[in-house]
Image: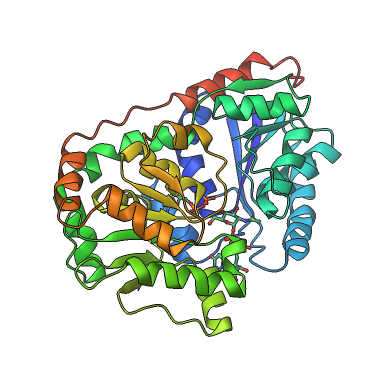
Amino acid sequence: MRIVSVVGTRPQLIKAAALLPALRARHEEVFVDTGQHYDEAMAGTFFEELDLPRPDRALGVGGGTQAEQVARMLVGLEPILLAERPAAVLVYGDTNSTLAGALVAAKLGIPVAHVEAGLRSFDRRMPEEVNRVVTDHLSRWLFAPTPTAVANLAGEGITQGVTLVGDLMEDLAARAGPEIRGSAALGAVGEALGLDLRPGGFLFATIHRAENREPDALGAWAGLLGAVATRERPVLLPLHPGTRAALEREGVALPPDVHVVPPLGYRSSLALQLHAAAVLTDSGGVQREAAWLGTPCLVLRGTTEWVEALADSGGRMVVVGLDRERAAAELARLAPVGAAEGLAASRARDLVLRPAGAAEAIVAGLEGDREAAGT
Ligand code: UD1
Ligand code: UDP
């Protein structure tokens, strides 16, 4: 089958790295990058680190308002799909690049395959929720990562073309596991950052959701991180450029024991999550990775789409929003100073990461419906 796959953001490059070897072994793939993320640390670096092929077509759309960004993608993608006339367009996740790929394909009558279908926060103020709902309703193949995602689709009347395949990011995490578990992996990241990082001796945080870039939210999470960071156990915050810009715009300064570093590579991010005392994040990808690694995780949002990760965490994952007292109390319970070092060391020692088999299941799912795709 000839497939155009569309990526554009950091997590989509990471998901593509998990799927492409299996996809390319069986199909002809045209790899299109919208350029939604464009900094070297947010995009370029992942091509090399994750062995991704250079994009066949790069749109270079960059940032902008929701409408500007999606509009530039629609205009850029249409001639590519007209020229390539693929049997399917494959999109990942819930970003504006996902929406644009699905919309252009659907308008041209090209079947859409959606990886990470069916996730819902039930909060349409989130740009991602709008993107997911529209993409799912336009898709021929809906590759759901969790049983809840399948149930969400059924709740919207979508049952045709739905396959439960597991989580593609778990496949990649399993591949990287052996490289990050030793304390040398932590030492190497610390050295590169000029920081002395000891297992269990720091908290790892990431923040980038649109809701957490609102003026009031910026102060709230900065205060939360300040409340849990100490000189002995600082917060390490690889800062998304959009969040950095929002902090600067609103004049919000981060507390002194919050160490800001540039966005990291994939393995560095995983290694820091594994060896941290705990993870604090509003990222969908990071919360699942923390769950697979067994690291305590505070979700800095009001909801999560990853209800299985929450339920299966045995209380190690907690949705705390921006409530700093709650965050401090949960950290005292899950990663108490004094015990967290030993917990981190044993977690790394006993680490077992199993692939979900999602990449193979997605490729098989696409092949199972070749006739429907007219190939
Ligand atoms: C996007 C996705 C979000 C995903 C996240 C992954 C949408 C609506 N949101 O959010 O679902 O979780 O990617 O990280 O698609 N910027 C840079 N350099 C870059 C990238 C972004 O400076 O390389 C700045 C730009 O000013 C841009 C802002 O960050 O305007 C926001 O970037 P954008 O791609 O619009 O959304 P994200 O917040 O990254
Ligand atoms: N990640 C990374 N470097 C960082 C922060 C995160 O490589 O500095 C990885 C993280 O390990 C996960 C993915 O990026 O694999 C998650 O992407 P992100 O948080 O940008 O988006 P989301 O998952 O929320 O859509």
Which residue does the image show at 79% across and 44% down from the upper left?
Answer: 104
Please give left or right for residue 349 compared with residue 51 in the image.
left
Where residue 102 sits in the image (x, y, percent)?
74, 41
Residue 67, compared with residue 111, is above or below; it is below
- Asked whether, in this view, residue 37 is left or right of residue 131, the answer is left
Where on the picture, by quarter, is residue 107? top right
| Residue 276, quarter of picture | bottom left
Name the side, left or right, on which 138 lies relative to 114: right
**Image position, residue 34 (x, y; %):** 64, 55
The N terminus lies in quadrant:
top right
Q: How many marks?
A: 0
Q: Is residue 332 visible?
A: yes
| Relative image position of residue 273 (x, y in whole percent) | 31, 50
For the point 73% across and 56% down, which residue is it?
73
Say which residue appears at 26% left-offset and 30% top-offset.
352
Along the line of sight, the residue nearer the viewer: 288 or 31: 288
Residue at the farthest bottom position = 251
- Scheme of image coloration: rainbow
Work out whether residue 347 or residue 72 is closer to the camera in this orientation and state it. 347
The residue nearer to you, when weighing 13 against 314, is 314
Where is residue 76 drawn, in percent x and y?
75, 55
Q: Is residue 1 visible?
A: no
Q: Quadrant of residue 200?
A: bottom left
Q: Identify the residue shown where x is 50% and y is 26%.
A: 166
Q: Quadrant of the C terminus?
A: top right
Residue 224, compared with residue 110, is above or below; it is below
